[in-house]
Image (cartoon, rainbow, N blue to C red):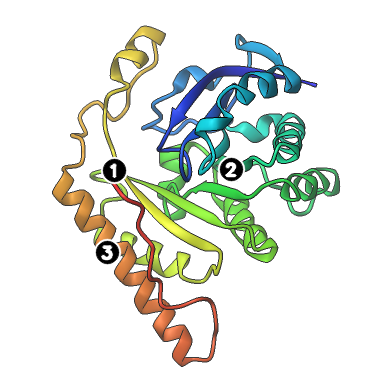
């Protein structure tokens, strides 16, 4: 089986635990206003590679990946879900930890043929790096161009499967950098026992030149990058709300995994 590959990075330390071999796939149905890889949106124009070719290349890096593993990202990697499943299965045969970096948008619990594909993928997935674009439905659609319903369903599905999640939440001034929304995000995440970490990502505008080169309007051109101080503040608001909600749940006899002792990834 072949996949349409955008790029491969070796030695990444920001795409999951340890040192990672990261495969970026082409294609994405979302149009996030802050996306720093708009060149992955189009599912065409990448490099066709087989699972065997990627495994052969990855093997040369295995000595440096003992505490890491394979991460598949995008774009939205589950545009190519069959390829991802086969790639993860091959990695598992080598004893390599697998991580999926996804929006969760393409999950369809009520479509049997799609749900069946996710069941197969779940069997070979060790960790999911899952986006939280915006907790407010209207803002979510404004920021991404899509509704959040299937993403919420995917959170619930992973919780049922007990597949660990590292949440990634981009904080955009004027949008998601809002105390009420950040607290609401924390309360939402508190209800999933499989959330193992929350990665607060400050918005940056380093992709501006790429948008200009591709002839795409950069809608957030007047939004200034989030400061480090504001990033810490946002992190605290999410984490504190999450802890408070889990303590409330504990008092109500709802056991989810509390307190939330290790919620923040190192910077």
Image position, residue 140 (x, y; %) = 45, 47
Q: For the residues labelled 1 and 2, say whether their Cβ atoms are less than 8 Å apart.
A: no
- Name the element at disc 3: helix
Residue 245: quadrant of the picture: bottom left
- Could you say which is closer to the camera, residue 197 or residue 234? 197
Residue assigned mark 2 = 99
Q: CA distance from mark 1 to mark 3?
A: 15 Å
Q: Is residue 245 above or below residue 194?
A: below
Q: CA distance from mark 1 to mark 2?
A: 25 Å
Q: Is residue 74 visible?
A: no
Image position, residue 186 (x, y; %) = 38, 65
Of pointers 3 and 2, the one earlier in the residue sequence: 2
Residue 66: quadrant of the picture: top right
Q: Is residue 220 above or below residue 103?
A: above
Q: Residue at x 59, y 53 (%)?
A: 149
Image position, residue 168 (x, y; %) = 43, 48
Of pointers 1 and 2, the one earlier in the residue sequence: 2
- Name the element at disc 1: loop
Q: Give neighbour class at mark 2: few <14, some 14-19, many 20+ (Cα, 10 Å).
A: many
Q: Residue at x 62, y 63 (%)?
A: 159
Q: For the residues labelled 3 and 2, say whether their Cβ atoms are less than 8 Å apart.
A: no
Numbered mark located on residue 237 in the image: 3
Q: Nearer the viewer, mark 1 or mark 3?
A: 3
In the picture, measured across the screen, residue 43 lies left or right of residue 175, that is right
- Could you say which is closer to the camera, residue 182 or residue 4? 4
Residue assigned mark 1 = 172
């Amino acid at each position: 089986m072949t996949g349409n590959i955008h790029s491969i990075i070796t030695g990444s330390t920001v795409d999951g635990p340890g040192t990672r071999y990261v495969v970026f796939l082409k294609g994405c149905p979302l149009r996030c206003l802050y996306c720093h890889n708009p060149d992955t949106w189009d599912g065409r124009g990448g490099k066709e590679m087989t699972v065997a070719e990627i495994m052969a290349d990855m093997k040369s890096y295995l000595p440096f990946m003992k505490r890491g593993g394979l991460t598949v990202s995008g774009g939205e990697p589950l545009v190519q879900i069959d390829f991802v499943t086969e790639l993860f299965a091959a990695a598992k045969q080598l004893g390599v930890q697998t991580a999926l970096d996804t929006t969760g948008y393409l999950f369809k619990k009520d479509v049997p043929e799609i749900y069946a594909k996710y069941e197969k993928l779940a069997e070979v997935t060790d960790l999911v790096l899952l986006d939280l674009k915006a907790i407010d439905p209207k803002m979510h659609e404004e920021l991404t161009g899509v509704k959040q319903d299937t993403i919420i369903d995917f959170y619930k599905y992973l919780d049922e499967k007990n597949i660990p999640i590292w949440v990634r939440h981009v904080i955009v001034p004027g949008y998601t950098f809002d105390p009420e929304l950040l607290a609401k995000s924390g309360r939402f995440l508190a209800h999933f026992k499989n959330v193992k970490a929350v990665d607060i990502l400050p918005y940056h505008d380093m992709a501006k030149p790429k948008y200009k080169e591709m002839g795409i309007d950069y809608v957030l051109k007047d939004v200034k990058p989030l400061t480090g101080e504001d990033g810490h503040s946002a992190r605290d608001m999410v984490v504190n709300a999450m802890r408070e909600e889990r303590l409330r749940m504990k008092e109500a006899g709802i056991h989810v995994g509390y307190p939330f002792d290790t919620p923040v990834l190192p910077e």
